[in-house]
Image (cartoon, rainbow, N blue to C red):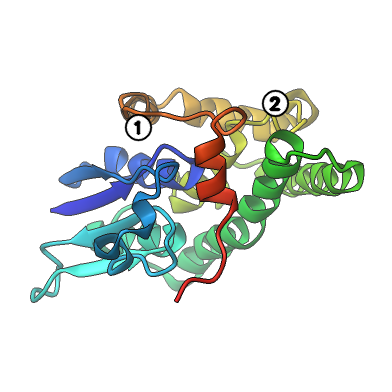
Amino acid sequence: MIELYYWPTPNGHKITLFLEESGLAYTMKPVNIGRGDQFKPAYLAISPNNKMPAIVDTAPVSGGEPITVFESGAILQYLAEKSGRFLPADTRGKYKVLEWVYWQVGGLGPMLGQNHHFSRYAPDKIPYAIERYVNETRRLYGVLDKQLEGRAFIAGRDYTIADMAAYPWIVPYESQGMALEDFPHLKAWFESIRDRPATKRAYALGEEIKDRFDLTTDEDARKVLFGQGAKR
């Protein structure tokens, strides 16, 4: 059984996309990041970076004690290897997928996250910062659009964890200042994933979460998420 520590953010959605596609048994444990659940000692024992998501596999393939995994890219790779799905077994295919997973976790996610912050949440609108991250978002969309030319999915003809990693970060494209019509290959890929039954189920789970917050108006949540410093 997989215990999923989750909140409906792009990184959280990555994991529910996988679990709903794969059929692996799991239970969801909400981590309300706007109320500080990620700083609780029990959660830090699983995810020492005080970020979400994280998993506990209570029945690892190798047997023995439960395995904990934090960081969404590592979780996707772990689940793919556990289930034998959405990650090719051959070396060339596997690393083609992992290249794009790491591209997402090292570039697409962080840069689009900064776009969100400076465009929507920063108390002072800094034109240079907004332009910087909107332009980088556009560049990354262009990289992905080019990769998808002639391909159904990022790494080829098959749906993989590379697609699951990238898709949730494209969902809020309008708030990132992007128009999908400017990226036709990305647009076709996006719509094909959006329409998958497992995608619809994964996003519906997020809508069921209680005590949602709006970072544009909730000052307490803003302090929790944007006021972090070093803690000892």
Q: Which residue is labeled 1 in the image? A: 202
Furthest residue to the right?
Answer: 128
Looking at the picture, how far across and down is residue 47, in whole percent? Answer: 35, 65
Residue at mark 1 to residue at mark 2: CA–CA distance: 21 Å
Q: Which residue is labeled 2 in the image? A: 174
Disc 2 marks a residue whose amino acid type is Glu
Which image quarter: residue 126? top right
The mark that comes first in sequence, 1 or 2, is 2
Circle 2 packing at 10 Å, graded few (<14), some (14-19), many (20+), is few
Circle 1 packing at 10 Å, graded few (<14), some (14-19), many (20+), is many
Kind of element beneath mark 1: helix
Which image quarter: residue 172? top right
Kind of element beneath mark 2: loop
> 78 left or right of 123?
left
Residue 14 seen in this snapshot? yes
Q: Residue at x 57, y 31 (%)?
A: 171
> 100 left or right of 107?
left
Residue 167 seen in this snapshot? no
Q: Residue at x 47, y 48 (%)?
A: 11
Which image quarter: residue 230? bottom right
Determine whether label 1 and label 2 are within 8 Å by CB.
Answer: no
Disc 1 marks a residue whose amino acid type is Ala
Q: Nearer the viewer, residue 59 or 40?
A: 40
